[in-house]
Image: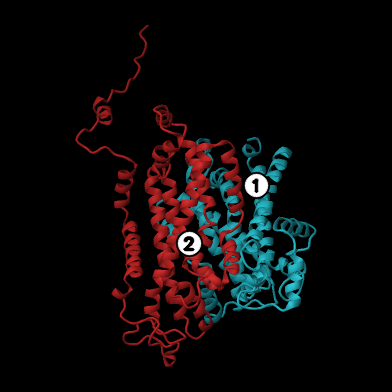
Amino acid sequence: MLMYVVRRLLQAVPVVIGTTFLIYFMVFAMPGDPILAMFGDKTPNQATYDALAAQYHLDQPFIVQYGLYMKDLFSGNLGTTFSGQSVGEVLARTFPVTLKLAAMAIALEFSMAVILGLFAGLRKGKLFDNITLVIGLIMLSVPIFVLGFLAQYFVAIKWGWASPTVGSDTSLANMWLPAVVLALSLFTTSMRLMRGTVIDTRSRDFVRTAYAKGLPGRRVIPVHVLRNSLIPVVTNSAANFGVLMVGATVTEGIFNVPGVGNTLYQAIIRGEGPTVVSFVTVMVLAYVVINILVDLLYAVLDPRIRYA
Amino acid sequence: MPKPEHYVAPFDENEMAEVDKVKLNEKPSNLWSDAWRSLRRRPLFYISLVTVLIIVLMALFPTLFTSVSPTDNCQLANSNGGPTEGHPMGFTRQGCDVYARVVWGARTSLAVGLLATAISGVVGIIMGAFAGFYGGWVDSVLSRLGDIFFSIPYILAAVVVMSVLADYRSVWTLAFAIGGFAWASLARILRSEILRVKSGDFVMASIATGRTPFRTLVSHVLPNSITPVIVYLTLSLGGAIVAEATLSFLGVGLPTSVMSWGNDISAAQTSLRTAPMTLIWPSIFLTVTVLAFITLGELVRDALDPKARARG
């Protein structure tokens, strides 16, 4: 297991270097003045310009710039936002909110995927299976911002079941609607995966053995079928994190949740390039870390992986 | 003492003969004809195919569907107006006809979707094919490169690219921003498929007859591992259309002067409380289009996968 952990961590090193280099390259190796480009049609004042030029070491050759940028990144200096706050401080304030929203969404998504996928797999080809298939495909096709607006209009504004915007009150009761929207945008792939695995697992010999021993279905299904079908769903949640990050950016923007996603959303809407770059870098690094954690979790769940 | 007779089941000669018989008068079956036969029986296939054809027709010849101009004759007097005679979906905030804008918007959304998918397809096929077929250091380099692109959610990458390219936003830059970062999964899928295919005898035979490895790759290995690529590309076409709409919604997609479903939804969000239908109509068109492509991809996947066919 230790060997596997070390190997997986070593594999992440080129990915971290590569992703940060790629983002940095996209912004700073473009022809023209990168700082002016980041502001689009706005012109920064001289003080902001100088601060950014110093922060990104623009007087140095490109590769030295990148090296210094990485040094800053790993010593915790993530740059400053457009309004002059340090990115680290903004993250410390907004991250817990996003974490709460993401945890709610994932918990909801996971239980929906497992329960619906299990019953769809057990009733393969029946009405329930087809209904979940159609609902799942529709949820996969609706862009998250459309889902967000529809939920906001119907559930919050028209029927008044939730507040249309979250604002500063980030209690569970106030954030359930954006969490549901996020979960709905995520659950289809997991549910379809769960359904397929349940169908596969059900035809395995150990399930037949369990029935042959005379065990009732209410024991075979949860203990033998369900538990052995969960691994692919857990791994899929890693791939889902990419969708979740984009989804959180849009959902937090629509419902005005004061999280990391909303900060990025506001920066994009207002064309504040430097903030966008800092936050995308942070999100990509978080994505890399989450992928490592899920891989390790996978190895814990499935011994075949760590001895491979 | 006589032993009891063992029961021996009668040998069913006819049934086995039926299985073994080579039907000479029937066309030989192959993967594609089998897939087509199973697709033909699914009503969902026709529904999604007709939907896709209508959208394509709408993109190519919008005047077939509406004679109202989507940009001229916009009168602020009609701002957020409900449906009237000749304007079945009402008016936008700017007083333009919603139906005409939705019809004309199909072209942009489809163009970005197709271009982005084509770009990610070309890059993904090249990267995956070379990595899988040549192995060794080529594989190491290309696969690590793929890992890097795989680790960046492509919409976030496109947000950065489009933020930097603020002055050059167009269908082409948007397609490159989406497609240039969406190829990594495809390369992974193709690489593992090629690893499976390349150990086949026909590959060795092709090399033994003096074909260069590259020509073997192009004429034998790729055609035999293209199935998952086609399925993936059909599915990702829907994803690319959603990506265009999402980026336009965030304000880093196409310029607001370009008509697209994403831009229309984005513009309508300020009128959500007063005129929700101006937001809902383009959303419906967007969703139905994506749904049609994704359903088509799922059906083709099922049809091409004999295991799934057997599962029913």
Q: Residue B240 got which mark? A: 2
Provide residue A144's location: percent of width, then percent of height: 53, 67
- The residue type indicated by label 1 comes to Asp
Q: Residue at x 31, y 85 (%)?
A: B86
A11 left or right, relative to B82? right
Which chain letter matches label 2? B
- The residue type indicated by label 2 comes to Ala
Write down the quadrant of residue B47 in the picture: bottom left
Q: Residue at x 48, y 36 (%)?
A: B196
Q: Colour of chain B?
A: red
Which chain letter matches label 1? A
Provide residue B48's location: percent of width, then percent of height: 35, 61
B50 left or right, relative to B146? left
Q: Residue A295 got which mark? A: 1
Asked whether the viewer can see residue A126, the reply is: no
Q: Residue at x 70, y 68 (%)?
A: A97
Count of numbered circles in the view: 2
Q: Which is more foreground, mark 1 or mark 2?
A: 2
